[in-house]
């Protein structure tokens, strides 16, 4: 599903990722590590937002250097900062935008938008200005806009950072239920309990790649 082959990323004269080789095919994959260890860069490599300086990244059988546009259609990407992906004036319009680009009929768009907003408790805000939502509500809106497209694979960069306990649980439940494979970067270690595989990064290198219990144990020792 995702293959990193000898991947290094050098930015502004610094090695942000060094010689990462991973073959990922599990349904739930977590990535943890200290601030600045390269987690977001690793996530961004998966949909071609970042490109390797050396080595290559293959996603769903395609090289991210040569097929970035196609890969972005297949891979839903949730940014840490929801303001980075909210573009339309109202909540419903923002979710509808990506669907209209897919050529769906107005009635179909409306039905899908209402459905996803209701699922994430934003239906009351459908016609409200998106910029007036709280940070957590914006994060949920960004999630709705990604999920409504039913991508083949999802990448989430710190999806629960702005969420209260109830909404964090909603995202944890979603991660259990979603049919698609998901790669999640997070500092919310509880989110990873039910995951299949967790990768620990340290200074741009993979230093553990194991079950959640083993990987988080390694991460805790690294941080102590
Ligand atoms: N465009 C860029 N230009 C220069 N340096 C960058 C760029 N993007 C990231 N970096 C650097 O790469 C390193 C890794 O950044 P990255 O965002 O991948 O870390 P992270 O593990 O996600 O951190 P955090 O947990 O704080 O979000 C950091 O030192 C950062 O300053």
Image (cartoon, rainbow, N blue to C red):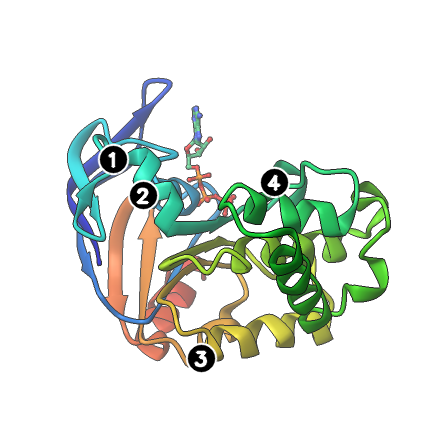
Alpha carbon of mark 2 to alpha carbon of mark 3: how far?
29 Å
Q: Residue at x 33, y 49 (%)?
A: 202
- The secondary structure type at the circle numbered 4 is loop
Q: Name the residue under label 3.
A: 193
The tag earlier along the polypeptide, 4 or 2, is 2
User: Which element is circle 1 on?
Assistant: loop
- Comes first in the chain, label 1 or label 3: 1
Q: Do the residues labelled 1 and 2 touch (CB within 8 Å)?
A: yes
Residue tagged by mark 1? 67
Residue labelled with disc 2: 71
- The CA distance from mark 1 to mark 3 is 34 Å
Q: Which residue is drawn at 22% across and 66% down?
A: 25
Q: Please identify the quarter of the rendering in which residue 28 is found.
A: bottom left
Q: Which of marks 4 and 3 is in front?
A: 4
Query: Crowdedness of circle 1 by 10 Å Cα count: few (<14), some, many (20+)?
Result: some
* Nearest-to-viewer mark from 2 and 3: 2
Q: Which of disc 3 and disc 2 is earlier in sequence?
A: 2
Residue 221 visible, this angle:
yes
**Which quarter of the image is occupied by the C terminus?**
bottom left
């Amino acid at each position: 599903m995702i293959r990193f082959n000898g991947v290094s990323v050098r930015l502004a004269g610094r090695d942000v990722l060094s010689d990462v080789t991973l073959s990922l095919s599990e349904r739930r994959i977590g990535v943890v590590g200290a601030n600045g260890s390269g987690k977001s860069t690793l996530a961004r490599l998966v949909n071609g937002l970042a490109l390797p300086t050396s080595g290559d990244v293959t996603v769903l059988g395609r090289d991210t250097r040569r097929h970035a546009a196609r890969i972005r259609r297949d891979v839903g990407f949730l940014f840490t900062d929801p303001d980075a992906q909210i573009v339309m004036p109202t909540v419903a319009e923002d979710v509808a935008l990506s669907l209209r680009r897919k050529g769906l009929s107005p009635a179909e768009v409306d039905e899908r938008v209402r459905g996803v907003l209701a699922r994430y408790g934003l239906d009351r805000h459908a016609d409200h200005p998106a910029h007036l939502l709280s940070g957590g509500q914006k994060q949920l809106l960004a999630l709705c806009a990604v999920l409504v497209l039913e991508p083949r694979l999802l990448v989430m960069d710190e999806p629960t950072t702005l969420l209260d306990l109830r909404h964090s649980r909603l995202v944890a439940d979603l991660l259990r239920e979603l049919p698609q494979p998901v790669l999640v970067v997070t500092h919310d270690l509880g989110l990873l309990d039910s995951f299949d595989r967790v990768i620990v990064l340290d200074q741009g290198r993979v230093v553990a790649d194991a079950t959640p219990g083993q990987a988080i144990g390694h991460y805790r020792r690294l941080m102590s």
